[in-house]
């Protein structure tokens, strides 16, 4: 089972290494990892997807909360959230197949970001299921290259977070 965890951390040198080290030191595998700044320049948000049962998730959360630079850990297992991922890919598109690739892109609201004689570079954002289905449909044309950002997520709770009660 996949679990999405959002971690608010101090924006300092070595924090990512300590968080990743906690996972590897305990044998937990990180499926995806995304780190970026928040509105406050002194903090960053890490969104981590980890695979395991609820027991593993509980251990991960407890260990994360013990780390010095971790401000808060938010587990999205028990609450509603929205999530997205960005994927950039290059797919083969000959004169015979180009229109079909373009039609699939239109249906999935993907954007063509570069066009070459034999390939198209495509950008798509969406949920894991949408991305998976899109890649499945394009795989028959030949995916030449692919890069994924990893999941980012926000709680679906009218803009209020548990951090608001601390202010």
Image (cartoon, rainbow, N blue to C red):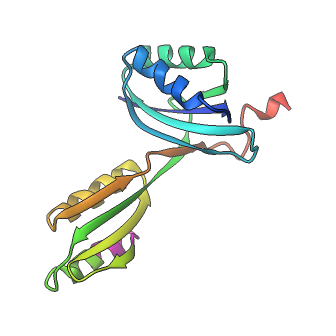
| Near-viewer residue (143 or 127) | 143
Above or below, comparing residue 34 to residue 101 in the picture: above
Hey, which quadrant is residue 121 in on the image?
bottom left
Identified at 24% across, 68% down, the residue is: 91
Instruction: Report the side of 29 relative to 140 (left or right).
Output: right
Q: Is residue 106 magenta?
A: yes
Above or below, comparing residue 116 to residue 154 in the picture: below
> Residue 131: where, in percent of width, then height?
34, 55
Instruction: Report the side of 102 relative to 141 (left or right).
Output: right
Residue at the extreme front of the image, as rendered: 13
> Residue 52: where, in percent of width, then height?
36, 23
**Quadrant into which the C terminus falls:** top right
Identified at 30% across, 57% down, the residue is: 146
Residues in magenta, as a range: 103-111
Instruction: Report the side of 110 relative to 8 (left or right).
Output: left
> Residue 13: where, in percent of width, then height?
63, 32
Instruction: Report the side of 40 relative to 139 (left or right).
Output: right
Identified at 46% across, 45% down, the residue is: 151
Residue at the extreme right of the image, as rendered: 167
**Quadrant into which the N terminus falls:** top left
| Near-viewer residue (72 or 3) | 72
Residue at the extreme bottom of the image, as rendered: 95
> How many numbered tags mark residues here?
0
Identified at 44% across, 50% down, the residue is: 149
Q: Is residue 139 magenta?
A: no
């Amino acid at each position: 089972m996949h679990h999405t965890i959002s971690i608010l951390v101090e924006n300092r040198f070595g924090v990512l290494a300590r968080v990743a080290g906690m996972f590897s030191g305990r044998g937990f595998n990180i499926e995806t990892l995304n780190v970026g700044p928040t509105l406050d320049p002194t903090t960053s948000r890490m969104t981590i997807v980890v695979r395991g049962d609820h027991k593993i998730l509980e251990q991960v959360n407890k260990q994360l909360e013990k780390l010095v630079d971790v401000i808060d850990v938010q587990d999205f297992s028990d609450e509603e959230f929205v999530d997205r991922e960005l994927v950039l890919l290059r797919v083969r598109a000959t004169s015979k197949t180009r229109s079909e690739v373009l039609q699939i892109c239109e249906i999935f609201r993907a954007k063509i970001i570069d066009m070459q004689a034999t390939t198209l570079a495509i950008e798509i954002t969406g949920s894991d299921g949408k991305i998976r289905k899109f890649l499945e449909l394009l795989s028959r044309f030949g995916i030449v290259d692919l890069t994924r950002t990893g999941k980012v997520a926000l709680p679906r709770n009218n803009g209020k977070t548990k951090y608001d009660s601390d202010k």
